[in-house]
Amino acid sequence: MKESYKSIYRICRDRSGLTQEEAAPKLGISVRALGSYEAYSIDVGKHMPPEDIVLNMAKLYGTPWLPLIHLKENTLIGREIFPDIELTDLPLAFLKFQAEIGDIQPLESEMRKVILDNHIDEHEIETSETFIKELMEGIMSGWSLIFSAIEKRPLREQRSQVITLSR
């Protein structure tokens, strides 16, 4: 099976070097349940792994980006909030991040004037919307860079990384 047709859950498990038989007990689930989660497709809509299992997979497999990809692929909110987070080659991720930060820097001075009074007036809305758009693109490229960098580390270092999402 081509990796592009595998679920993100299976891809992460495969990258960790674990078999279903090794991973399932460490996740506290049966091999059959893990197989069902790995066969999950949003089109089918059955057997989507619960959030606690996804978080445990991320820790076990050393893939801290898995919860974000899970949200992006499986929820409308995730697709809206995380549209451009992707794993890429590390140099490409770094260059994209630099470019996005470069787009933000010229707006800083103008945005500083907008926010100093702690209020955005009607005539300042366009400036703030442009700044927010560029900032979101910078944040998304920053996540991509972080996850691409973690992906390039040896597996034992990946497993020690923990991502804490806002709760």
Image (cartoon, grey):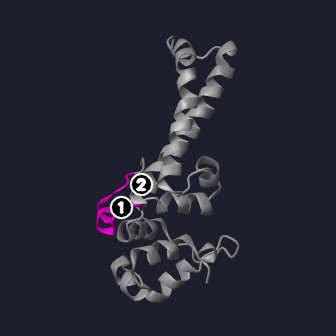
Using the numbered discs, state the Cα–Cα distance from disc 2 to disc 1 in whole angstroms: 7 Å
Query: Measured along the vertical axis of the image, is residue 116 above or below residue 82?
Result: above
Q: Does residue 84 appear to the left or right of 49 in the view shown?
A: right
As helix, strand or loop, the secondary structure at mark 2 comes to helix
Foreground pick, 100 / 42: 100
Q: Callout 1: 10 Å neighbours few (<14), some, many (20+)?
A: few
Q: Amino acid at mark 1?
A: Arg
The mark total stands at 2
Q: Does residue 89 appear to the left or right of 26 in the view shown?
A: right
- Residue 120 forms part of the magenta stretch: no
- Residue 157 forms part of the magenta stretch: yes
Q: Amino acid at mark 2?
A: Ala
Residue that numbered label 2 is attached to = 149
Foreground pick, 66 / 120: 66
Task: Give the magenta-colored segment's residue range.
Answer: 152-164
Numbered mark located on residue 153 in the image: 1
State the residue at coordinates (47%, 71%): 12
Position of residue 85 measured from the top left corner of the image (x, y, whole percent): 56, 52
Query: Measured along the vertical axis of the image, is residue 137 above or below residue 90?
Result: above
Q: Does residue 137 appear to the left or right of 18 in the view shown?
A: right
Position of residue 133 measured from the top left corner of the image (x, y, whole percent): 62, 33
Q: Callout 2: 10 Å neighbours few (<14), some, many (20+)?
A: some
